[in-house]
Each structure stands twice: as C-alpha cells, then as structure tokens.
C-alpha cells in the first residue's frame, strides 16, 4: 500500500479533505482515547490513545442491495480513512425492527470487500451493528428526561402533527410538555415494559416548538413498536428514531467525521444538540463527532432508489439483483465493471455540496481507462456472415490448408506474448462489412474492392450470394491476393483502405454474447411528472447474439475481461460462462457513442 503522503499528493483536494487537514493540523482529535470497541465516555477514557487518526463509517440499512451511489459513499468513507491513517467502520444500521434478510447483509459485506476495502484495522474488526447500542440509547433517554430535556408525549399522532406547525407557522407546545421528571420517567418505563400499545406515546426531545428548523421542534426520540427484532428478539418494544440513533452510534464508535448526503443538512442542528447534551452529561466521549454533508450521486440513465430497484427485480424487468443492467454493485460487477474503475469514477466525480447529475459516460470512461492497459485483445464477429475465398486452394495448394496468423495479446506490451489463430478458405466476418453498393466513404468489402483481413491476408471482393427466398446475404465471395500476409516481406505492396476483423470458420468458437445497453432510455429517469418510470425502460437494453470468437478465448475464465477489437470491452459472465458454453457480456463500447 502507498503511504498516506503519497496518496495525498495524487488526490485532488475537496471540502472534506480540507476539513480533515484542518482537524489534523489543529490536533482536534489527537488526545482521544479508544476502548478497543464502541463504548460510552468512561470506558473510552479508560482505554488507549486512539490509534486511528480519523474514524469514518459506512452505515447501510440492510434492506436491499447496494448500488452505485453507495459505491461513491464507500469509496469516500473508506478512501478517506485509508488516505489519512484512519479507520472506516462497517456499521449495519439495524435499529428498525424489520425483518433483516441475511441475503442483504451478506451482499453488502461482499460488495464492500469486492470494492477493495476492509474494516479490519489495528488488529480489530470494525464491523458493528447499531442494535448493539440499544441499552446505551435507552440510558441516554432516561438521562435526557432527568436533565429536563425530554418528555413523554401522549397526544394522538394527528394532534402531534397539527401542533408541529409548518414552514411559516411556529408549532404549539404539547399539553404533556410540562410533565415532571418523575412522571416522564415512570411513563417511559411503562412504555419500555410494554404497558402501552403502538402509537400511544412517544418520547420527545424538549427543544423549541417555535424553532425555524422544524427538525428542532421537539423531535421524537423513541416510539412504541411491539415487534421482535432480528437481533435483540423480544427485549424491546420501543425503538429509537433514526435521527436519535444515528448521532449516538457515531459517538459510541468514536467517529470523527460523519459523512452523509445533503438531505440530512437540516438534521445537523439536532445532531449537534443531542451530542452536546450527552457530552455535557458525561455520557459520550469527547471531542464528539461532527456531521458533514455531500451531494448524493445521481447518474444519468440510472435509478438508485432501493424501493424501485426492488420493483425492477420483483416485477421481472430484469433477471435479478445482479442482472448486468442493474446499477447495483452486484450488477456492475457481473456486467464487467472492476473495483478499480469504480474507485476511479468516485475520485473523478469528487464530492460537492450541490446536487446535480453525473453523466453515465464518466462511469464508462473510467472503465475504459482501467481496462485499456489491462485487457487482452481478441477478435470477435458478433453478426456473422461467411466469407469464402474461392482461389484459396489454388494459391495454397489445398482448400483445407490453414495458415497460422498471430497478433499481440496487448498492442502496447509485447511481453504478454502473441495470440494465434488460423486463416483458411472460410472465415466469419461482420455482416455490416459487406455492401453491394457502397455508400460514400465505405472502404470495406464491396465488389472490386481490396481489404486486409487484420493480421492476415489481403483479399479482393467479387460479390456475394443471397438466399433465394429471403434475399439475405449468405456468403460473401472473395479472392486471395497472393504474397500479402501481414508481417511478411512485401505485404504492404498492395495498398488497401479497409482493415477488417474476422474469425476462422475452422477454429472459431461459437459463443452467446449479451449486448447490454442502458436500462432506461431517458437521461433522467423518474423525474417527469405524471410519467411512470416503468414507461422509461429501454426496450432494447438486452440483445442476445450468437457470435464467433477467436480460439484464444477458449481458455477465458468467468469474470475475465477482454477488448474485442472494434467492438468494445467484454467479460466472460461470472455466473453462466463455462468452457463448453461460452457466455460473454458487453460492458461498454470502445468510444462514447451515447447521445451523440
Ligand atoms: P433507504 O433510505 O431507501 O434505505 P439509502 O440509499 O439511504 O436508502 P442507506 O442504506 O441508508 O440507503 O445508505 C447507506 C449510506 O449510503 C448512507 O450514508 C447514504 O448517505 C449513502 N448513500 C445512499 N445513496 C447514495 C447516493 N446516491 N450517493 C451517495 N451516497 C449515498
Ligand atoms: Mg437511508
């Protein structure tokens, strides 16, 4: 791993890096102690000096698969921790007593690890779940009551909503706001003991019903929910609200920089209010965490709402969470995206304070930039038609004669060796490489024209035969121009303008190739009033073809990426590709062709 200093010099600065630079320069967190695990103030203070210079966290709710927006958040949080000698915690935010699906938990861990990050640092696994903090959260709630900072409100939910006021209208104090500490404490304990039904009462912070920030108008801290929790079972029938739980989770874990998306900006005053009060009460470690907001990722042609991604799967618009058209990390991975390309993408888009749309072509460019120097080259014919070289036997001595041709595995790295494939009387070429009457500027096969079959010989086209019934071209006919084989002396004596790719009929491999395109056909799906996002699905997002591939691809392993010359980047499908039944996915074309 490169040292923090090396990394810093490579990365463009941004407002978060400036905040961290300033905190490190001022030693804001230098004197902090760490218990070795999440803990309250006293336990942390009895621990060692914190070995982490900063602590960040990635806190998904385990209720779905992660998507490309989460990838940005993962790269940001784990990337900053890595670059600054810090630690990033992996935290499952499971404070809702909803059924947790192990499938989601596993897929989330898998996605973070695949992206190249780890929550192991300084000999500790920083893998946490928020429900482990329920005891502390409850203790903090009793503390707030005792300090006169919280009360049990028994208004009906409707009355509570009405008394909250709105943007232009201050709220009205609840009649329960002036209850005594003892009464509040007794009532909270009854709530906890299960004596009250769902919705009968909530615990609220006592702040200011006239605050211009509605989030500060006595926000709810706890609600009653008689539901078992996947982890704590029946221990609780009251559960903390997200806005109450999240700051506490950060504080117990000694988080220094709590990064979240802009929607939470209005929650920051409450985040600070709560942690200020708990710090004053000596409950949480100091200095306390700070929240910083950045713009969430909106990517053109992509939807990232978990609920809608689930609908895509449940309604069968795609084949599953890891369908190569899905913007989930599992889908991107199967499509052929690499961890490096997603990291590069995250670095390039950076972080900003303003919401906007990032063009999908930036993601594809990052993939190309990552794969171009790495991916082995190969020839492939995706829409095959046969080319027959009629004088082959005459020139070569026999119609069955095969002539070995070679090409570099990588054009800029001869050390990677050469691929071999056989030229013969019959070759597969792209249907679009033949035109009976060539349009202006067409230099490939048409009667009377000469082209080079890449890495092979020059041929002259003499026409084509058509299927009598359909009129479709069945074979393209040509004659070999002798002494023109690539790499042999005098090969260039015959000048040609066209250079086409091909695969030998004798040694080509038949394969299923899945030509993926964008899942949505509009740039900003789900943003047009009155139009259902389902109507915006691209009906051509998947086209499956039977292709021929050069024989070097016979040894391709699932997940291995290639550049198919002229066509783009392809990956052997990690689930369905097999030696005897090759399946390749198109990741992206060679150039950005969208919206042009
Ligand atoms: P939901 O609220 O529907 O469960 P979510 O996308 O907010 O969905 P979380 O599991 O809460 O999902 O997200 C985990 C982390 O990922 C949060 O810190 C959140 O800010 C971040 N995140 C989610 N979506 C994006 C996005 N599009 N761009 C950047 N960060 C995101
Ligand atoms: Mg969320």
Image (tube, helix red, strand yellow):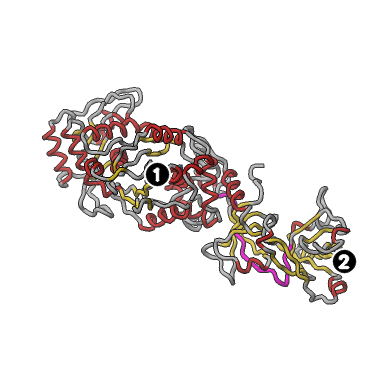
- Residue 100, given in percent of the width and then of the height, sits at 33, 54
Q: Quadrant of ligand 2?
A: top left
Residue at image position (35%, 34%) is 28
In-front residue for pair 33/540: 33
Q: Which residue is mark 1?
A: 86
- As drawn, 376 above or below 301: below
In 3D space, how far apart are the residues under numbered discs 2 and 1 (Cα atoms)? 66 Å
In-front residue for pair 458/182: 458
393 on left or right of 39: right
269 on left or right of 551: left
Q: Secondary structure at mark 2?
A: loop
Q: Secondary structure at mark 1?
A: loop
417 on left or right of 296: right
Magenta residues? 502-518
- Mark 1 surroundings: few (<14), some (14-19) or many (≥20) residues within 10 A: many
Q: Which mark is residue 482?
A: 2
In-front residue for pair 78/124: 124
- As drawn, 307 above or below 458: above
- Residue 438, given in percent of the width and then of the height, sits at 83, 53
Q: Is residue 419 magenta?
A: no
Residue at image position (58%, 70%) is 579
Total marks in image:
2
Residue at image position (62%, 55%) is 569
Whether residue 126 is visible to the viewer of this picture, yes or no, is: yes
């Amino acid at each position: 791993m490169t040292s923090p200093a090396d990394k810093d010099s490579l990365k463009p600065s941004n407002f978060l890096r400036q905040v961290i630079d300033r905190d490190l320069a001022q030693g804001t967190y230098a004197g902090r102690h760490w218990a070795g695990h999440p803990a309250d103030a006293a336990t942390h203070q009895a621990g060692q000096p914190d070995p982490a210079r900063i602590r960040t966290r990635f806190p998904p709710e385990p209720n779905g698969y992660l998507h490309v927006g989460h990838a940005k958040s993962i790269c940001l949080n784990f990337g900053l921790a890595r670059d600054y000698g810090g630690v990033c915690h992996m935290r499952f935010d499971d404070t809702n007593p909803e059924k947790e699906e192990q499938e989601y938990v596993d897929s989330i861990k898998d996605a973070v690890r695949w992206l190249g990050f780890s929550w192991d640092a300084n000999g500790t696994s920083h893998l946490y779940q928020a429900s482990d903090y329920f005891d502390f959260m409850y203790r903090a709630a009793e503390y707030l009551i005792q300090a006169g900072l919280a009360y049990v409100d028994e208004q009906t939910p409707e009355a509570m909503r009405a008394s909250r006021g709105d943007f232009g209208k201050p709220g009205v104090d609840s009649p329960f706001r002036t209850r005594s500490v003892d009464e509040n404490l007794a009532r909270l304990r009854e709530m906890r003991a299960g004596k009250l039904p769902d919705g009968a009462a909530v615990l609220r912070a006592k702040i200011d019903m006239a605050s211009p920030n509605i989030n500060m108008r006595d926000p709810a801290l706890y609600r009653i929910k008689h539901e078992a929790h996947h982890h704590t079972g029946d221990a609780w029938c009251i559960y903390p609200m997200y806005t109450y739980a999240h700051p506490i989770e950060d504080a117990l874990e000694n988080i220094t920089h709590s990064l979240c998306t802009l929607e939470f900006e209005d929650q920051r005053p409450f985040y600070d209010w709560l942690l200020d009060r708990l710090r004053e009460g000596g409950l949480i470690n100091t200095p306390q965490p700070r929240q910083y907001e950045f713009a969430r990722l909106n990517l053109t042609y992509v939807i990232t709402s978990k609920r809608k991604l689930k609908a895509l799967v449940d309604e069968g618009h795609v084949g599953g969470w890891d369908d190569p058209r899905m913007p989930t990390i599992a889908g991107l991975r199967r499509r052929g995206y690499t961890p490096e390309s997603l990291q590069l993408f995250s670095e390039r888009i950076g972080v900003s304070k303003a919401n906007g749309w990032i063009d999908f072509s930036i993601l594809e460019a990052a993939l190309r930039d990552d794969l171009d120097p790495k991916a082995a080259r190969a020839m492939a014919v995706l829409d095959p038609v046969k080319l027959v070289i009629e004088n082959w036997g005459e020139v070569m001595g026999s119609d069955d004669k095969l002539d070995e041709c070679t090409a570099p595995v990588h054009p800029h790295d001869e050390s990677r060796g050469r691929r071999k494939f056989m030229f013969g009387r019959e070759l597969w070429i792209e249907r679009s490489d033949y035109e009976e009457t060539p349009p202006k500027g067409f230099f490939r096969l048409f009667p009377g024209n000469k082209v080079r079959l890449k890495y092979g010989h020059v041929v002259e086209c003499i026409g084509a035969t058509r299927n009598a019934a359909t009129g479709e071209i069945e074979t393209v006919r040509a004659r070999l121009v002798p002494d023109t084989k690539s790499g042999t002396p005098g090969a260039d004596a015959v000048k040609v303008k066209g250079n086409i790719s091909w695969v030998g009929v004798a040694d080509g491999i038949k394969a299923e190739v899945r030509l993926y395109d964008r899942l949505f056909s509009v740039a900003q799906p789900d943003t047009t009033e009155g139009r259902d996002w389902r109507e915006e699905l691209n009906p051509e997002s998947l086209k499956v073809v039977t292709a021929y591939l050069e024989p070097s691809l016979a040894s391709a392993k699932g997940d291995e990426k290639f550049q198919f010359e002229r066509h783009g980047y392809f990956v052997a499908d990690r689930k369905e590709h097999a030696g005897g039944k090759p399946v390749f996915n198109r990741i992206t074309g060679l150039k950005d062709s969208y919206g042009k």
